[in-house]
Image: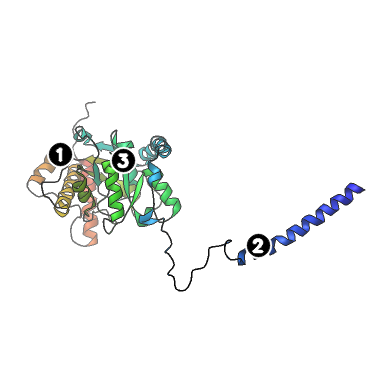
């Protein structure tokens, strides 16, 4: 009997505590400092809230040893098999990188979100695991989840599309000088119709500033897998063509070097469509087709792109003697 009365008293006491919880919460909610931030006097301008996303995201943690080990296993164990299944990549021109010693800036055309993963997994050692990507700050770093994923999987740093921001340029320069290579898409965004956009000067500026070569790269086929506006990928064949590393000329300014990089990528696109000899002859004659396609109506651009893909699929290749 005594035990029963003690149990009843305990239950009554517990019920009283539970009844007081909402009241305590309300008191804490309405309480001032130190339970919440102090108010700011009317004569004092409040400090702006610290920005932690977009171009201000701090991705330094992604280059610490634990994150590097995790990225190695993610790249080799997950990203490469997924890319192999979706993109069925054919990699050309790797022999042109034989003499590449030290970090480089790999500048490629851009048609799909698949491009970064495809390019990084196509890089030869040691660049594949010593590389960072320039990710659009307003897309890949606009939320905490996307920022963490981009930094961990792609070792991406936030890059502003409209300009080479001071913060982005300083961080990229520090990584290049520390021996990291860089993957960048100078167009600044994905192509909406399969044709290229004018290159921006970020790659040229960083190359001139840090004394590292630019490797032009052309990626073909990712626009059929997951073009802009499509969220579900469709497997297809892709071709990644590496060009000869380029150095800026003495006294060359970023705009002029940018034009040369774009021309080199266009020549690689012509090579992927036809063959090396024909593309080099057209390049020497100044007749390399533009990455941006014909400046005519939408139907004409679509027709020309379809014809280009047919030429690429039927082009004569050197026999594989391996």
Closest to the camera, between mark 3 and mark 2, is 2
Query: Which corner quadrant holds the C terminus?
Result: top left
Q: Secondary structure at mark 3?
A: strand
Q: Earlier in the sequence, mark 1 or mark 3?
A: 3
Residue 159 point in image, percent of width and height:
31, 53
Give me the residue at 29% from left, 45% from top: 174
Mark 1 surroundings: few (<14), some (14-19) or many (≥20) residues within 10 A: some
Q: Earlier in the sequence, mark 3 or mark 2?
A: 2
Of residues 134 and 17, the one nearer the viewer is 17
Q: Is residue 128 above or below residue 252?
A: above
Give the CA distance from mark 1 to mark 2: 74 Å
Give the CA distance from mark 3 to mark 2: 50 Å
Closest to the camera, between mark 1 and mark 3, is 3
Q: Are marks 3 and 2 in contact (CB under 8 Å)?
A: no
Identify the residue under disc 2. Answer: 25
Closest to the camera, between mark 1 and mark 2, is 2
Furthest residue toward left: 285
The disc label shown at residue 276, or none = 1
Identify the residue under disc 3. Answer: 131
Q: Secondary structure at mark 1?
A: helix
Q: Is residue 229 visible?
A: no
Of residues 202 and 39, the one nearer the viewer is 39
Q: Earlier in the sequence, mark 1 or mark 2?
A: 2
């Amino acid at each position: 009997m005594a035990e029963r009365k003690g149990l009843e008293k305990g239950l009554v006491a517990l019920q009283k505590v539970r009844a007081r919880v909402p009241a305590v919460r309300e008191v804490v909610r309405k309480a001032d400092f130190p339970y919440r931030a102090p108010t700011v006097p009317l004569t004092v301008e409040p400090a702006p809230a610290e920005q932690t996303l977009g171009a201000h995201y701090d991705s330094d943690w992604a280059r610490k040893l634990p994150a590097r080990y995790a990225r190695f296993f993610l790249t080799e164990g997950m990203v490469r098999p997924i890319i192999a299944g979706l993109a069925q990549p054919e990699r050309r021109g790797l022999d042109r990188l034989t003499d590449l010693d030290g970090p480089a800036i790999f500048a490629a055309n851009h048609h799909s979100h698949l491009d970064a993963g495809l390019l990084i997994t196509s890089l030869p050692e040691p660049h594949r695991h010593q590389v960072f990507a320039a990710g659009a700050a307003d897309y890949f770093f606009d939320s905490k989840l996307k920022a963490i994923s981009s930094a961990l999987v792609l070792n991406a740093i936030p890059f502003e599309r409209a300009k080479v921001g001071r913060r982005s340029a300083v961080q990229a320069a520090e990584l290049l000088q520390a021996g990291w290579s860089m993957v960048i898409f100078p167009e600044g965004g994905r192509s909406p119709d399969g044709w290229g956009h004018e290159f921006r000067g970020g790659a040229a500026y960083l190359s001139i500033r840090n004394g590292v070569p630019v490797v032009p790269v052309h990626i073909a086929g990712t626009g059929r897998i997951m073009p802009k506006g499509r969220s579900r990928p469709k497997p297809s064949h892709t071709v990644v063509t590496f060009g000869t590393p380029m150095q800026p000329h003495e006294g060359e300014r970023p705009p002029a070097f940018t034009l040369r990089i774009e021309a080199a990528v266009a020549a690689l696109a012509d090579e992927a469509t036809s063959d090396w000899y024909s593309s080099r002859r057209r390049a020497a004659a100044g007749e390399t087709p533009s990455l941006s396609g014909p400046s005519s109506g939408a139907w004409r651009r679509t027709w020309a792109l379809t014809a280009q893909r047919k030429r690429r699929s039927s082009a004569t290749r050197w026999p594989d003697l391996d």
